[in-house]
Image (cartoon, rainbow, N blue to C red):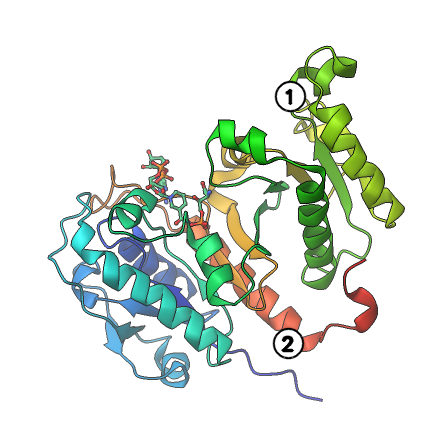
Amino acid sequence: MNAPKRKPLVVTMGDPAGIGPEITAGAWKALRETGPAFAWIGDPACLPPGTPYEDVVTLTEAGSIFSKALPVLPLSLVAPVYPGEPDVLNAGPVVDSILRAVGLTRAEDAGAVVTCPISKAVLRDAGFPYPGHTEFLAALCEVPGEEVMMLASPMLRVVPVTVHVSLRDALNTLTTDLIVKVARTTAHALKRDFGILNPRLAIAGLNPHAGEGGHMGREEIDIIIPAIEQLRARGLNVHGPMPPDTMFTDTARANYDVALCMYHDQALIPIKTLDMENGVNTTLGLPIVRTSPDHGTAFDIAGKNRAKPESLIAALRLAGQLASYRAANPEPPEMRFT
Ligand SMILES: NC(=O)c1ccc[n+]([C@@H]2O[C@H](COP(=O)([O-])OP(=O)(O)OC[C@H]3O[C@@H](n4cnc5c(N)ncnc54)[C@H](O)[C@@H]3O)[C@@H](O)[C@H]2O)c1
Ligand SMILES: N[C@H](C(=O)O)[C@H](O)COP(=O)(O)O
């Protein structure tokens, strides 16, 4: 039987005053011969001067011209773009680019969505009601609350249990049920999409020394250990709570497939420190594949020809692999949630 033909991926514009346009042009140059092929939904006026691009109407056209030019599904901005100076007036097209990308992927015209970085502050100032792509994508896919953020690189995978909230709110919202839910979605995705049959989950503690038996905080005893017990009772391969300060050493990382962390920076500091260039953000729990580079808009270097496209290239490669894996491996019923 022939392997299913790979569908082109679709890349969103992100904030046009950030590094999205230039890393997109850089990723196209790096991947034009090998793929995965993709189309970019954005305003060509914000691409670096001299970028060879061609307007397209369909993803099929994008696949056939990809080796010659960056395929663009055009979308007009409202305000002129000055690199490093985001404009709230362009929030509408930034959001439209995401909406169109999700529509094309849900319609199975595109293989996956790869998002360029948005400024959460600019979108929030414009009235956008979501904290980030992760939550917005879950709403668009009609699975609000099911989303799980995972950042992955060849060195480490991490999942923050609480995500885009203040540290104080993270402590207030951390519950046994939430840890169990996020861990189950993570284990399921590692089996389903990454081919890891019995994923090993390391659960971080919250407090110094994972609470030191309750002398440095009770969250491990009251919240985290009950979650670990429930997950083990479901047959998941889980260990912890691990002291957060030592769980990211080379030796410790060799013993797990993913680290479940209790708050955003506990998860993202280690991966961005160890492997920023190869890190990819992917949203688990969605019916579509979504990846993103692990960095933000980098307004400080936008338009200065200093932005590295490596993380976007890694995001495109991972999206291509996950989409192909899903197409070739329809989900067997026994793999569904344990
Ligand atoms: N997926 C996303 O949409 C996403 C992810 C992270 C942050 N953000 C947003 O980005 C904005 C800026 O966030 P930040 O300053 O904390 O992080 P950032 O990742 O934009 O920048 C942090 C530092 O890393 C550098 N950097 C980032 N990407 C780089 C690249 N590809 N090549 C070279 N250097 C690079 C920047 O110049 C900066 O010095 C925020 O508004 C945040 O909301 C968006
Ligand atoms: N929390 C992510 C990070 O710091 O890299 C980032 O903000 C991306 O979030 P979304 O993919 O939800 O936009």
Of residues 68 and 334, the one drawn nearer to the viewer in this rendering? 334
Q: Is residue 23 above or below residue 104?
A: above
The residue pinned by badge 1 equals 245
Visible in this render: residue 251? yes
Do tag 1 and tag 2 residues touch (Cβ < 8 Å)?
no
Q: Which residue is mark 2?
A: 327
Q: Looking at the picture, which amino acid does disc 1 mark?
A: Asp
**Residue 208 image position (x, y, % from top left):** 66, 16
Ligand 1, by image quadrant, is top left
**In the image, residue 182 lies at what x, y percent?**
66, 47
Q: Residue at x 36, y 46 (%)?
A: 308
Q: Nearer the viewer, residue 232 or 201?
A: 232
- Three-letter residue code for mark 2: Ala
The verdict on label 1 being within 8 Å of ligand 2 is: no
Q: Quadrant of the N terminus?
A: bottom right
> Label 1 vs label 2: CA separation?
39 Å
Q: Is residue 241 above or below residue 160?
A: above
Task: Specify the farthest residue to the bottom.
Answer: 1
For this view, does 187 lie left or right of residue 31? right
Which residue appears farthest toward the left when viewing the image? Answer: 80
**Mark 2 Cα-neighbour bin, 10 Å: few <14, some 14–19, many ≥20:** some
Taking the image as shown, residue 181 lies to the left or right of residue 72, namely: right
- The spot of residue 107 in percent (x, y) is 48, 80
In the structure shown, which secondary structural element does the residue marked by tag 1 occupy?
loop
Specify whether residue 253 is in view: no
**Residue for point 73% across, 72% down:** 331
Instruction: Give the secondary structure at mark 2.
Output: helix
Residue in the image at 29% along x and 81% along y: 56
The disc, 1 or 2, on the residue closer to the chain's N-terminal end is: 1
Residue 86, given in percent of the width and then of the height, sits at 20, 47
